[in-house]
Structure formats: structure tokens, C-alpha cells
Amino acid sequence: MAKTPVLTPRADDFPRWYQDLIGKAELAENGPVRGTMVVRPYGYGLWERMQQELDARIKEAGAQNAYFPLLIPQSYLTKEAEHVEGFAPELAVVTHGGGKELEEPVVVRPTSETIVNDSFSRWVQSHRDLPLLINQWANVVRWELRPRVFLRTTEFLWQEGHTAHATYEDARDYAARIHRDVYADFMENVLAMDVVPGRKTAGERFAGAVNTLTLEGMMGDGKALQLATSHELGQNFARAFGTRYLTGDGRQEYVWQTSWGSTTRMIGALVMSHGDDDGLRVPPRLAAVQAVVVAVRDDGEVLATARGIGDRLTAAGVRVHVDDRTDTPFGRRAVDWELKGVPVRIEIGPRDLENGTAVLVRRATGSKEPTAIEALPGKLPGVLEAEQALLLAQSRAHREDRTAEVTTIEEAVEAAGTGWARIPWAALGPEGEAKLAERGVSVRCLVAADGSVPGSDDQPGNVAVVARAY
Amino acid sequence: MAKTPVLTPRADDFPRWYQDLIGKAELAENGPVRGTMVVRPYGYGLWERMQQELDARIKEAGAQNAYFPLLIPQSYLTKEAEHVEGFAPELAVVTHGGGKELEEPVVVRPTSETIVNDSFSRWVQSHRDLPLLINQWANVVRWELRPRVFLRTTEFLWQEGHTAHATYEDARDYAARIHRDVYADFMENVLAMDVVPGRKTAGERFAGAVNTLTLEGMMGDGKALQLATSHELGQNFARAFGTRYLTGDGRQEYVWQTSWGSTTRMIGALVMSHGDDDGLRVPPRLAAVQAVVVAVRDDGEVLATARGIGDRLTAAGVRVHVDDRTDTPFGRRAVDWELKGVPVRIEIGPRDLENGTAVLVRRATGSKEPTAIEALPGKLPGVLEAEQALLLAQSRAHREDRTAEVTTIEEAVEAAGTGWARIPWAALGPEGEAKLAERGVSVRCLVAADGSVPGSDDQPGNVAVVARAY
């Protein structure tokens, strides 16, 4: 007899499956203001681990955390022409404060390039102050007409880096460093997600940037999701805000800048990359709980043994939770841990105890294996690394299987029905890009012939990766 | 010859000294929207350490982090009568979003009791869901007419805890536990600040609370600052939002709730408690940099030795920074480290090298002592603990010296000119409290005769601690 599905199967209705999972795994729910979300403790725990891993990499890249105000004078946004054009339709505007109408409305930050440059124009005086490398963890608001929890929300959480450099080359190299050593490294080695690093076309760049580097991931349904971006801003904001420095030989020059961000959208990406019909599958290096020891029922000895296993696994460096809620039926708890995607489950009941074994259940493979309790602490670290590697391999194979090499727009649209297409940029160009857009397909990024990130849109051999996208 | 003061001396103009220090130690600056602030990297580093220490204590108390939306429907605020009355004058109101006027204005959260209860009313069904213990790290906005950086800002950062319990007693005990084991413990043992735990009078309670516990600190000028509060909310918000649970015997009951918060104001408190005329003094347990090794000038060997000392101190568990900016004059760097308040400075120049010594400078005492380089790793941990203890002892002595025992309102007002007064609550009462308020003096808290936190305002023997306050 087939078991009743806990979630709508992905093959039946992928968006519905996503909503089901977000709700039943207690990751998040909608807030009362349209497009906002409440991130529940289990979902926030994923974000906390993402923050820890990203923050360490950001600091390793030399940036320091700071905090800039939420509220920005409306006039600031208009100082950089492309920037205001890009963000004006999404702004939340505060017109009243302290019981009075404000003389000048203020906007809730959609991003912080403008207010950061207000400070940078004071902080940067001499070439000795450069590079200036700043990051902030914050919330931003972009009014969202078609919200979807984690993926597109009116408010989201993120980190945004903002840097100023003495030369174009230094800024370019730093944007590339963040793209590679912070974002790509984190996504592959912690999130176990296959990502394609590339360059956005002119039409897809951040509002105010001269170049945008992106990481694109393929979701379970074959659509693309932009996971993080790193921008070269040139001197656009420096000119708008007068951010200049004195060179070694006494000239005043505008600084060269970068900005880069990654958001709570990554939680949605995690779900849509690794989730299956039973729930989420959290990669062990990300998981706040890597192994849950489940006491099947309470006969005293079982609970004591479960706790003992927990202690020994903790000592072995595994992040463990002991589930001792034996007043809740075992089956319901097992379903819940599957939904939440804890990488390894260790089930122990009276019968196991007699044999000195426990059942080791791996979430990614679904395998169940009786294992000697004595052997668990030695075995677990290797099992967790194997689960981590399996998730990345599955993610990579999924993208490779569903990516077609094509040469015409028709073929690209056809391929985008189930996955991605790669098409020579020379055969597509901005005109072909516009034609694809009419059919709901976008150029996710350009990649060089050898798979590296191209230095320009028109570098010979560039390939466009095109797809339907979230 | 007396050295030129870097800061306005405290005795000349305390508020000016505070502003000078905030600027010159690069802690923060004003944002462009009145009352907002930019927290600079050095100031934000203090906040990051506060977050780490508080977050660990909050999790130890069983609460989990989550995140609720910034934007709250205006109608939510009005559901609890006292709450809206308290916060209405301070609200920032968003009237336009996505280029359109909104049907219902939304407020930027001044605090989250209302939106949290919107979720709690769904999350709590049965007594098995209780206690529900949630915390969030977030920004809030309260329109501020007389802003002062860190102390009163239109936007500030904080943590806010929100909990639901089955019984009055359980909620009361949890509010007290947070007050004691999270806030008081953190302030004394990490911030090295003497604090007086007590109970707010009815007139000073949080808008919507039935009881507010507070921690009050005495600043360098003798004024009081409220450092953190923990509230019993009774069933006020539960009734307003319908947050009910099914009891073990099948009845529907409203939950009993608490909320509690601590903010970036603590950075201002740190400055005003431990700062002296040379700058900030950071307690070692808080400091992100506990010891800075300063190379006086670069002759190759000095730099190599400084880095070697840095490595050995790191290995000894000390958080170290090596200052190798030898192109900046040594004197300027020394002044800067004094301003920033790094607990210990280890200065090393060519002459020290000949003797195998370095100069150990303690920020809190100002002592300078030649010390054998070999002895530093063994000596530093003890020196840091001594500095930590000294700051707490000084803070305590300052409060005791400047607190007068009085029995009349006149004496209380007089004492509040330079410090605090303790006066029997029976001799003061709400009427005396109103009279003091007319003279700019407030009841900071009530404490029991034995120094504990009273269970009620009218407990016999209660003493009112009164002062001018920030």
C-alpha cells in the first residue's frame, strides 16, 4: 500500500509542492502586509547558519561589518539616474513621522548604495583610506507585486557589501574575488548547490552598475534562480555623491566601487534544489542539526541510551539533537524530521537495544541500516560528508542532464520548457535576447568558452545560458 | 607640559565629551534623516560582540530566533489600547508602496508585540505548544524629537524576546529569569557595568505591560540610563489577538506573555560608564581586540617580533591585533588605540628589542611596564581579567559614592544634581513621583529592602531609586 503523500508531489504541481513544504516544514509563513513573510525558527536557523558561513568568508576577504540607516531621503535615490529608474517602482515611502507630515518624504532602503556613499564621501580622503571594504547585514524593502515566500518578498534579509578602490582594476578584481571566494565557494561547499558563474548582459545589470557578476542555479523544475550578484559600479555613485580621494601625487580622483549581495532567497533555493517529495534535504555542512537521535518509545532505558548516543556524537564533533518527545507517536515524528530534512536520523527502540544496534537512516539516499551503537561516533562524520557530496553531485547531474546545446532561438525556447539552453552569444546578441524575452525566456548569464567568467559581453566564444527564471 | 586634550574633558562638558568620543573613536555618526545613525565598523564590532554574548544566554534560556516583518498594518497597533496610546506619537507611517497610495497605511515596527501575536494566535493551539519562547534580532523605528546617538535614535538595533506561557506564574518566572540570567549577568560579567535591578512603577511601565523589570546604570555624570527591560504582559495582547490554548482538561484559555529587549543604547552606556578623558575603555571580555601589539617603527626585526608576539598571544587564547602601520607616526596610533579603548597595548621598538622586552600598557589603569617578551603569553590572561575586574569595581564604587539615602523630596532633588537618591517608596508614592517629575527627576525603579526585586509596588520596605535620566 502506497503511503499517503505528505506534500503535493513535485511532478503534479511544483509551485504547490514548494508552498506545502515551506508550511509543513515550518520554514515560513506570509505576513499580514502583502508580500512580507514571517521566518519561523526552523527557517531562521538555516539563515543563521548561512550568515555564519558567509560572514566568515566576507571577513576573510577583508571586509568589516557596519550599519547604515533604514530610512533614506527620497532625494538621495535620484542622484544616480539609472539607479532611481530601476528602483522607483518598488519603493515604500514614509510620508508621516512622529504624528506629522514630513517636509521631505523618506524611503525605506531598497538597497544602500546611495546612503553608503553619503558616508564614504566623508570617510575617504586619501589613497591611504583605500580600499574601503564594508559589509552590512540588514533588511530591505522592495514592493513586490507577485510575491512568493523567500523568492520574491516585499521585505527580505540580506548582506550587502560596499567597497571603494583607488583603481578600476582593483575594484574589478575585488568584485570577482567576492563572486568566487565568498559566494561560489559557499554555495558549492556549504549549500551543496551546483551554480553557474557568469556575467549579466547589459539588459540584466543592476541599476547603476557597469558590470554584474551572477551565480545561477537550476531548481528542481528546471527553471533558473539568480542566487547572488557582485557588481562593478565604476565611478557612477562616486560622481553622484562626490566620493573622491587624494592620490599619491596630489590629484583628486573619484573612487571605483563595487557592491554585492546575497539574500534569504537562498533558503528558497535550498528547498527547490534539494527538496524531494518527502520534504527538504539539508546539506550536513549547513545543518544546525546534522543528526537527530529519535527514541522510538519511552521505557527508560531507551531514552537513556538515546541521550548517551547524543553525548558521544557531540563529542565526535557532530551537531546533534535528541528527540525525546515519546508522547508524540514515533511515525509522526519521523515524518516531521523527513520534512525538515535533517541529514541523518538514528532511531532507537527496545528491540534495537537488545541487539546493541540503532537504525541509521540517511535522508538523502533514504537508506536504513542497522548499525552497532558502538560504531556510530566513528561512522557518522564520514556518513555526513558522503551525504554532502551526494547532494552536490545530484545537483550537478540535474543541471547537466537538463541543459541543451542549441544554435537557434526556437531550439532555446523549446529547451527552456524543461531546463536550460546554451547558445552562442554571437548567434543571439541583444536582439535575440529581446526576442527570447517575448517568449518568457531570459539570458541568465554569459560564460566564456572555457567556462570562466568573460571579461566583456563581446569576448569571442561567449555562450549565453538561457532559461525561464524565478 | 600638559598634553593637549584629544577630547573635551568630561568635567568641562559631559555631553560634548560624549559626542567627541563617539566621533573620534569612530563609533558612529549621524545619518541624513534626523535621528538616524550610521554605526561605523569599530562601533559595530562592539555590537557584534554584545550580540554573540547575549544570543548565547538567550539560547541557554531556551528561546529560539525567528524573524517577523518590519511593516505592520496600522490597525494592528490599535488592538491593544494602552499600547497604541504609548506608541502612536512615535510612529513612522508608510502611505505609498510600489508607486501607489496604499489602501491601509502600514507602520514601520516600533516593537513587535502585535505582529508576533498575529502569528502566535496560529502557532499556539494546545498546552503542548507552551511555553513558546521566541527572540528576534532586528531594527525598529520610533520617531525621536531629541535624538542623541546610541541613546535615543529614530532607528535602533535590538533584540526583542516574545514568549507565551500556560500560567501567570510561568510567565512571571520567565520574565525574571531573562532579567537576571540574560541581562544582569551579561552587564556585570561582560560589560563590567554595575547595574541596579528593580521594578518600574506603574507610571514608567511599558505600554501594554502589567509589570516591567529594569536594569538601571549610573553614567559618568551621575545620571541614570535604563539598560534593558523585561515585561510581564499578562493576557493583554492574548485577548487583543485571540491567542488561546486548549488546556489538558479541554478548556480554552488565553496565554500569559512576556516581552524583553536590549538595544544599541548599550554602546552609549559603555561609553558613558567606562570612558575617561582619553577615550573609551572596553572591558576585555567584550573587546573584539583585547590586546594590540604596536610596532613603534619598522626596522624589519621589530615588525617580525611584533608579529611573533601576536601569534604567541593568539595561541594563548588572547584576541590580538598587530598594528604594523609604521608609516603613521607612533604617537598618533597610540592616541587612537587609547581613544578606541583597547584593554592592553604592547609597544615594541628597537631599544626594547635589545633588552628582550616590550612595554605593556594597561588602558584602565594607564600603567606602563617593561615586560620580558617571553613572559607575555603567560601574563596576559591574568592582566585582562584584572582589567575586567577593575572596571566593574570602579563602576560599582562610582554608583555607591554618588548615591544618597534620603527621606524627603527636597533632599532627593538635591542628590539628583550629582547622582542618585534612595528614598522609601512609602514616603514618596505616586504623588511624590509626580512632584519629582516636575523637577526633572524620575523614579528609575523600586527595589526591596534586601536589594532584591519586589513582587509588587506596595511591598513593605520598598525603596525608590530616583535620578535624572537619559
Image (cartoon, coloured by chain):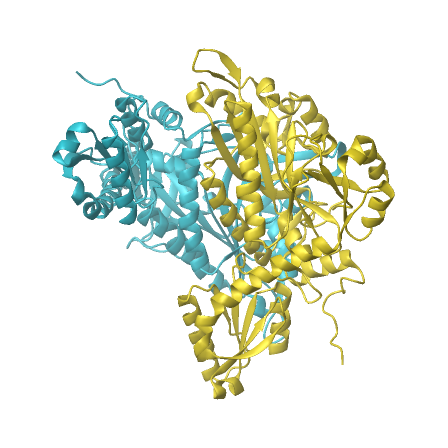
Chain colours: A yellow, B cyan
Q: Total of numbered circles in the picture?
A: 0
Which image quarter: residue A444? top right
Residue placed most toward the observer, A41 or B423 = A41
Where does the image place residue B285, in percent across and percent down from the top left?
31, 46
Where does the image place residue A391, in percent across and percent down from the top left?
61, 60
Q: Residue furthest right?
A: A410
Q: Residue furthest left?
A: B355
The C terminus of chain B lies in quadrant: top left
Q: Is residue B103 above or below residue B23?
A: below
Residue B446 is left or right of residue A201, and the answer is left
Residue placed most toward the observer, A375 or A310 = A375
Residue placed most toward the observer, A453 or A162 = A453
Which image quarter: residue A458? top right
Residue A13 is left or right of residue B196, and the answer is right
Where does the image place residue A242, in percent across and percent down from the top left?
55, 17
User: Is residue A63 among what the camera can see?
Assistant: yes
Where does the image place residue B83, in percent across and percent down from the top left?
58, 45
Residue placed most toward the observer, B129 or B50 = B50
User: Is residue B433 among what the camera can see?
Assistant: no
Residue drawn where x is 72% and y is 26% of the image = A85
The N terminus of chain B lies in quadrant: top left
